[in-house]
Amino acid sequence: MSALELREVVKTYGSGHAEVHALRGVSLSVAAGQMVAVMGPSGSGKSTLLTIAGSLEDPDSGEVVIGGRALSGMSRNDKARLRRRAVGYVFQDFNLLPGLTAAENVGLPLELDGTPARTAHAAALAALDSLGLAGRAGLFPDQLSGGERQRVAIARAVTGERSVLLADEPSGALDSVNAEAVMRMIHDACKRGVAAVVVTHDAQLASWADRVMFLRDGQVIDQTAPQPGPETLLTPGAQQ
Amino acid sequence: MSTALRERSVPAPVPARAGGGAPARRAVMRWAWRLFRREWRQQLLVLALITAAVAATILGAAVSISTPPSLSATFGTASDLATFHAPDPHLNAQVAALRQRFGPVEVIDNQVLPIPGSVDSYELRAQQPAGRFGAAMLALEAGHYPAGPGQVALTRGLAATLGLRVGSQWSQGGAARRVTGIVANPQNTLDEFALVAPGQIRAPSQVTVLFNAPGLTPATLGQNVQDLASARPPNAINPQTISIAGLVVGMLLIALVAAGGFTVLAQRRLRSLGMLQAVGATDRHVRMVVRANGAVTGAAGALAGAALAVAGWLAYRPSLEASAHHQIGTFSLPWLVVAAAMVLAVVAAYGAAARPARAITRTPIAAALSGRPVPPRPLHRSAVPGVALLAAACALFALSAASGTGPAEYQGAGARADRAARRGDPAGPVRPDHGGPAGPPRAGRGPPGPA
């Protein structure tokens, strides 16, 4: 069973002369432990694909299935519950909540799901520790560097029992060393069973994926398996 | 570096805790509080309005309640007061009757004496300083109370007028008394008197008896009896009521301003709220953040307003005591108004935040994350009803002009007034004609006068 599946998804914005076809019947299936990179020019529908895959937006037609459950017909509350339990997001601009420390940001989805604050905090600290951020847990987002923020965002996205990780240009605001480190973390998460969809412009980073999907004008124009494997592309700095 | 993730599966929904329960609420409230601490300056206008309204209400109510003379100046802590003008041969019997019927009574003898060399007078008063009802009417400022014959205590003004101080000898009516203290009536600082021990006035000109007669109207006891209710000025509206009514109106206006402020703030936080939804917050959680911000703003304004009012009160109270001519307790504040003002401030701010809270959850998450509010949808409403109503109004005006009736009642009244004027009848009716039966027709010109 696919962890994430999109079937003939169509999304159109605007109407009349301003009508934009963001997605035209896109289908995608991501198995558990698989990483799919989505590439394409600006305006090709990559981000729309992610927002629809993560229930942040509803498609005009088509179906999205996460963990065997179709999103159509789900209430807003059910979708919210799905987001905090099954889907993790990593955005280009981190999207950490201001006013919450790194640990609180990571533990927030757990708390929203009813986990007591102390337990959520412990889980958050463990996740941050595993990403080398144990010493930064008590800092606020504006006290962290870009790379640290993105690692916190990844920790938030994988904490708990998330099965799907959606990353929209996760390395877009980072230097090459941090970008490779971020991709490696996502890759590590996939090794542990997370299905990941990563939008990127960078072909070298896309080579971390098991499959690369090319979008143009809202349509899938190609899918391919990158060669060679990601480990061979690691820069010395990222390997440390 | 590796994540500690194990086998993954999509958990089944747990209906009992769909919203995350108390931990989720606590997390959301914590974030709302942090946001308020970070961004309170952006809510300075709303905070200032609430603070000013609460402070003005409390201070206004405190001043208006404390300014009027207190009935305690004459009643003490009693609810009823009987006045007897001496000499009255039945006085002792009447006092005994009151005591038998109503229990403890307190008798205060008064004798009006002229100030030597002046047209003014003062009272020589025989009263028990620790009396059951009258203790509130006495305060010792210096020395001690007179305890027996040959002792007297004076008010500060009277002592100055008579040129006496504590320890001086005071001669009056052939009797010499030593001044033992300076006293005052804290409920009425204009009350100038000389206090002697009970029973030390041989020929009182007036005797006041204080007692409690619960449930009885003074008229049933005698014409010389007053109770607190009958002594109050008639038709006086409780200043607390006026203050709270003013506060309600003021808070409604502030809530309107605050609603605009909270809407702007919610738009500024749109992206953060979108992030919150992206990590799994429900609409209820988002509404809670916005509403909690409103409640916290209201609470902060209420606390600041109350603190400001208390500080203002402490600063202004001495001046008020001087102008109101009675002592006012340091914390003699209208606590009911204080509580009402603070609660109302929180409720108003919370209510003002409710509308933007609802509106913000209608923004799609993807749009919120991008930080751009959804443009308002163009409304397509038919112009037909408006045009039809306009046409109907024009038609009615035209019909009115054509029939010459105009605003019928006033036109009729005007015509009749004109007719009356032509007849030279000064009592001609100028009231509107409501179609009721007309008065009898006048046969001719009558003499001027009432109809």
Image (cartoon, coloured by chain):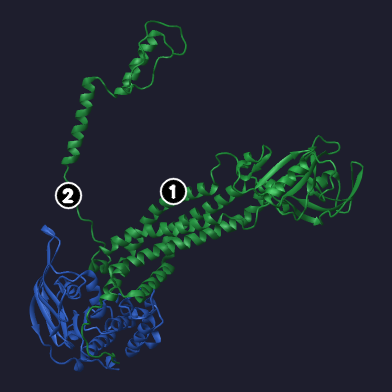
Chain colours: A blue, B green
| Label 1 secondary element | helix
Q: Is residue B403 above or below residue A24?
A: above
| Label 2 secondary element | loop
Amino acid type, residue under disc 2 in the picture: His
Q: In the image shown, does A13 or A222 lie closer to the viewer?
A: A13
Q: Disc number at residue B51? A: none
Within the image, what quadrant is residue A43 found in?
Answer: bottom left
* Separation of residues labelled 2 and 1 (CA atoms): 36 Å
Indicate left or right for B39 with A201 as reference. right
Same-chain check, marks 2 and 1:
yes
Q: In the image shown, does B339 or A54 lie closer to the viewer?
A: B339
x and y percentages locating residue A149 in the rendered image: 33, 80
Q: Please give the chain letter of the residue carrying mark 1.
A: B
Q: Earlier in the sequence, mark 2 or mark 1?
A: 1
Q: Disc number at residue B380? A: 2
Q: Please give the chain letter of the residue carrying mark 2.
A: B
